[in-house]
Image: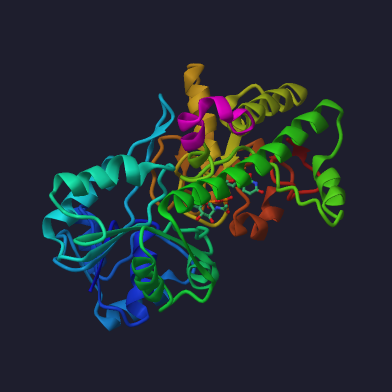
């Protein structure tokens, strides 16, 4: 039986996929409300294809509980936040989960950590726990790091088709874990050591963050000379060896703006490029704010309540708002003692902010300037309703609009 620890954005789809592919799976989460919700046959977040997968897995007999199981195979998918002050990983959830597993596991168990961790975390934090519990590595317990790689918005497809990395101390443990993932993963599964797997995962997200930072820096250069950055990137990308990503109002989510800090925190003298890239991405909400101020002045808009922010999530067509550029923008405003602008997001169905509007038509009607922060499909379908409004378009969706 496979016990998945942590039923969040990664753990739940992975547990469902394993169960739907015929594995015996128990999902464990310490959040009572979350487990109750799943047991009531209700999902905890939205994701294309998740409902069908949920039904299939439930029919196959997956169970959800707050208890850790006595078994020989665990996959830990708990959050790994980072400490904003010292820029280092906060391994407390991984430590707590490991300790609980060590209390109940069978002899010879496999413990897979899927959560993203900073390179060296297993050596620094997990191995000492095993030792303290009086267990022998590669005898009583086998440690494995198999970082997830799936993209929110395409999770189910990517779970099936992406390649994966398995980092383990022993080839036998790697093979066992590979066999389990291969029950649903059609991509290539590469086996390596734990340190390499840890580093590779963080490198992947750092690469993407740097590429986005480059696009964002180009936006600043283009703004300085009144050039169209999107046109420049489009043409440059026609070169066979150039592939610049898209600039935007900032970088959100729990991965790209976070994981590179693990490297900066651990290797401060060796990460100039990475830390500069992080700073560029973090400066983008400020650039949006400056553009809003310019446009307000240019068009004599004096009432702050006439500004409407479209989009609260960290990217298009997801309902996750963690570290979103809009929240970063509001934080900047609050730091300057200003009330945040009104905001609307079709993906956020619950009112979580006092300045949030729940009706799109009213939101549009009451706005003179609408700032497009997230390119939801909903926006593309309703773009005509914005006619007659000033628009600041941070994603190059609308022809006749102000750009970043
Ligand atoms: N963004 C841009 N420009 C782009 C692409 C993205 O500004 O060209 C912004 C998005 O709007 C968003 C942020 O970056 O605010 C992050 O979005 P994303 O789609 O790039 O990535 P995530 O955070 O949803 O997922 C990433 C993925 N990593 C890579 O593509 C290397 C995913 O595969 C990982 O599994 C995930 O991080 C993770 O959990 O680590």
Percent position of residue 54, x then y: 35, 73
For the stretch drawn in magenta, the main secondary structure is helix
Percent position of residue 300, x then y: 73, 22
Where residue 401 sits, quadrant-wise, is: top right
Q: Can you say whether 243 is above or below 111 in the image?
A: above
Regarding residue 391, the answer to whether it shows in the image is: no
Regarding residue 179, the answer to whether it shows in the image is: yes
Q: Give the residue displayed 51% in from the left and 46% down from the top.
A: 202
Q: Nearer the viewer, residue 344 or 169?
A: 169
Q: Which residues are magenta?
A: 261-275
Q: Can you say whether 33 is above or below 218 in the image?
A: below
Where residue 273 sits, quadrant-wise, is: top right
* Quadrant of the snapshot with the C terminus: top right
Colour logic: rainbow
Percent position of residue 79, x then y: 34, 47
Was residue 346 drawn as part of the magenta stretch in this picture? no
Q: Nearer the viewer, residue 287 or 120?
A: 120
């Amino acid at each position: 039986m496979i016990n998945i620890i942590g039923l969040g954005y990664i753990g739940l789809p992975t547990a469902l996929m394993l169960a739907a592919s015929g594995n015996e799976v128990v999902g464990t989460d310490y959040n009572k409300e979350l487990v109750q919700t799943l047991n009531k046959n209700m999902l905890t977040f939205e994701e294309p294809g998740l409902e069908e997968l949920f039904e299939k897995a439930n029919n196959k007999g997956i169970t959800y509980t707050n208890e850790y199981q006595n078994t020989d195979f665990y996959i830990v998918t708990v959050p790994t936040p980072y400490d904003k002050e010292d820029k280092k990983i906060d391994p407390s959830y991984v430590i707590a989960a490991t300790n609980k597993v060590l209390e109940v596991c069978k002899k010879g168990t496999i413990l897979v950590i899927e959560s993203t961790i900073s390179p060296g975390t297993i050596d620094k934090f997990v191995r000492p726990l095993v030792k303290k519990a009086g267990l022998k590595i590669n005898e009583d317990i086998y440690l494995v790091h198999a970082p997830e790689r799936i993209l929110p918005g395409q999770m189910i497809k990517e779970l099936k088709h992406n390649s994966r990395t398995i980092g383990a101390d022993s080839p036998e443990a790697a093979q066992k874990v590979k066999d389990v993932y291969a029950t649903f993963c059609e991509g290539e599964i590469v086996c390596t050591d734990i340190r390499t797997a840890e580093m590779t995962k963080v490198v992947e997200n750092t690469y993407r963050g740097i590429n986005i930072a480059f696009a964002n820096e180009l936006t600043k250069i283009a703004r300085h000379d009144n050039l169209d950055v999107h046109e420049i990137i489009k043409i440059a990308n026609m070169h066979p060896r150039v592939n610049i990503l898209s600039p935007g109002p900032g970088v959100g989510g729990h991965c790209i703006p976070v994981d590179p800090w693990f490297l900066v925190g651990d290797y401060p003298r060796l990460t100039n490029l990475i830390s500069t890239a992080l700073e560029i991405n973090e400066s983008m909400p400020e650039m949006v704010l400056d553009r809003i101020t310019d446009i307000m002045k240019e068009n004599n808009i004096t009432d702050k309540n006439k500004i409407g922010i479209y989009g609260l999530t960290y990217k298009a067509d997801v309902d996750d708002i963690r570290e979103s550029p809009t929240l970063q923008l509001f934080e900047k405003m609050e730091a300057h003692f200003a009330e945040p602008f009104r905001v609307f997001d079709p993906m956020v169905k619950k009112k979580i902010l006092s300045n949030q509007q729940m009706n799109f038509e009213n939101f549009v009607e009451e706005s003179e300037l609408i700032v497009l922060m997230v390119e939801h499909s909903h926006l593309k379908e309703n773009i005509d309703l914005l006619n007659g409004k000033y628009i600041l378009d941070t994603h190059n969706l609308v022809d006749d609009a102000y750009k970043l």
